[in-house]
Amino acid sequence: MGHAENFYLENFSLAGVVGESIVFESGNPLNYFEAIEAPHQIERINISGKLFIASSDNLSPAVIVVPGSLGVGENHLQHAETIVSQGIAAFVIDPFANRNVESTVANQTPFSFAASAFDVLMALETIAKHPKIDANRISAQGHSRGGSAVLMASTRQFADPIIGSNLCFEGVYAVYPWCGHQFLKPSVGHTKVRAIVGERDDWLSVQQVQSQIQAVALDGGDASIRIVKGASHSFDWDEEVYEIPEASVAPEAPTVYLDATGAMIDPVTGEANSLSTDRTHFLAAIEGGFGRRGAHVGSSGEQAYIFREDMLQFHKSTLRV
């Protein structure tokens, strides 16, 4: 497997497959409302990624791999390599490089969570047109902030105005996703949704992840969750648990719901405001005493193995491999 620092080298490979460099147009919406209701206002930006397709005479299923707050890391490439080794293409995208952002660990606001979800939809639209990809068998896997992005991209309230109602994911695998933003009625159509999160994750609210999955299920979606006993955030990493002291988190802050237009609903007043942004409510959480510094990442025992087995089972069953 190649190392993350070599990701942009021309001959970078995973599972013996050299990646195809792909650049696609995405955008920087200020919030979900702008992405849905005012797409003409969105600042456009190119996002880079690499597509790894195992050799086959048939159209290949694919998984879009979306990193978290540290950008493309060794764990994402390891999982992509595992996916490719099963005959499934992997499209690893880098939402950070072209935005000149190295990390959002200490500050999540250099670009919006809506922009992260927008990236995922644009990646889907891009590889669905690829001559070697089966457009009817594309899933997405996102980690942490990327998990939030793939969950949001799976909701038809967000996706339909952006890419239309005919294009959708077969599955979405949300890995320890932050679920502080949720549509009031999160419809996902036929997309199969699964979340996996650690029982002792102190980066996010496990209860918010549970409520998100339950809301999808109550709306008729195929949604499930696995809570891994004793696990911290990033328990898919093959390294011992340690603290990231600069991490800015607020796991006890109230959920910010979105109305049908994507406008954020103030948890205190109950009023929707199309001008509210991530920063609006992150600052409110800090002022409310919910913000703090420091969160743990890493794994112990067989947690990383448990993750890989769950990941493979989901993708192979969902993509019919």
Image (cartoon, rainbow, N blue to C red):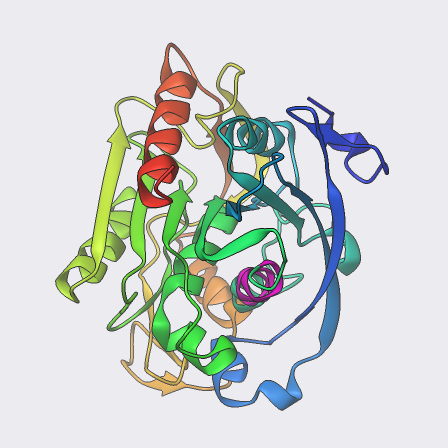
Residue 71: in sight, yes or no?
no
In terms of image quadrants, where is residue 270?
bottom left
The picture places residue 25, in percent across and down from the top left corner, at 71, 69
Q: Is residue 99 above or below residue 244?
A: below
Q: Is residue 292 above or below residue 114?
A: above
Q: Which residues are magenta?
A: 118-127
Instruction: Quarter of the image for the N terminus: give it.
Output: top right
In terms of image quadrants, where is residue 218?
bottom left
Residue at image point 65% right, 33% down:
73
- Front residue of 154/257: it is 154
Residue projecting furthest to the right: 10
- Front residue of 109/115: it is 115
Residue at image point 54% right, 15% down:
239
Horizontal side, residue 273 vs residue 20: left or right: left
Instruction: Quarter of the image for the C terminus: give it.
Output: top left
Horizontal side, residue 189 vs residue 18: left or right: left
Residue at image point 77% right, 51% down:
97
Horizontal side, residue 19 vs residue 206: left or right: right
Q: Is residue 225 above or below residue 110?
A: above
- Most common secondary structure along the magenta stretch: helix
